[in-house]
Image (cartoon, rainbow, N blue to C red):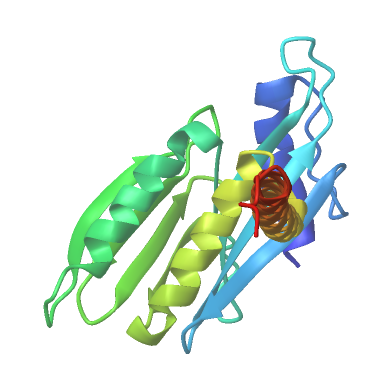
Amino acid sequence: MWRCVSKIIVGPLMALLIGFPPSIACSQPAGDFDVIAQFSDSRVSLTLATHSQPSTDNRRPLGITIGLFGLESVASPARPAFVYEIGEWNQILDLWTRAKEINSDTWQIAGSVKQTGAYASTLTIGGGPGVIISIDDPAQGTLTMVLSKSEFDRFHTALLQQRDVLLGLGKNFQALQDAGKAADAATKSVEDSLRRSQELSDEMQKNLEQMEQTRKNLDQLRNLQLPPR
């Protein structure tokens, strides 16, 4: 479903950012749309996703990737979404960090961040018995969901994954990390081999020096003038 909604929400935003015509057709948007994680309470579900779009603008030769928060409910026609670029990620992280640290039996708002551009949705995050995530979307309506404390770690991980995609690290980030670890292990193996080779070389040099000293001692013995009997 969010591939459909992203065409409605992401299309106009992309039109503003990289200059292609917006569309509200219910079909998969151009580019790569990837769901990172989904969460739900008893009424509302939250999707964290990213959307990457090739650029037709020379100012953005590598295209653009945006993050998306989407809320939906079977009991409501509202499908609000909030989209953002990497420059706004720290604001979202700050709201999340403050909200999850609120220790209260009642809900308290940590703060809000407003989407840039003409399609200005507002993302609001608060804390208390859990964390509330609310999106007020002028075009799609308003929904709020409750994230339980048991989901805090998974949500934080999803935020970091969203950031990695926006930074251009994407799906291959773990593979890059694994390759880096393998390279580190190979480097350590080579260093160990070089160190062992050096130790063997030092040992051989020491043996050669001992052999040379033994040879000198033998020469000295040969040159000794034994006293006549």
Q: Is residue 18 above or below residue 84?
A: above
List the single residue furthest toward the top.
58
Screen quadrant of the N terminus: bottom right
Q: Residue at x 23, y 58 (%)?
A: 98
Q: How many numbered markers are drawn? A: 0
Q: In this view, does 83 lie above or below 131?
A: above
Instruction: Examine the image and state in which quarter residue 131 appears.
Output: bottom left
**Can the viewer see residue 80?**
no
Q: Quadrant of the C terminus?
A: bottom right
Residue 200 picture location, percent across and down: 71, 57
* Residue drawn at (79%, 10%) of the image: 58
Q: Residue furthest bottom?
A: 42
Q: Which residue is drawn at 72% across and 59% down?
A: 189
* Residue 164 horizontal/vertical position (percent): 60, 48
Closer-to-camera residue (99/184): 184
Q: Nearer the viewer, residue 172 or 178?
A: 178
Q: In the figure, is residue 182 to the left or right of 93?
A: right
Instruction: Find residue 12 and report its horizontal and vertical position in percent.
Output: 69, 34
Residue 103 visible: yes
Q: Residue at x 85, y 42 (%)?
A: 31
Taking 92 as reference, is 80 left or right?
Answer: right
Residue 101 x/y as whole percent: 20, 67
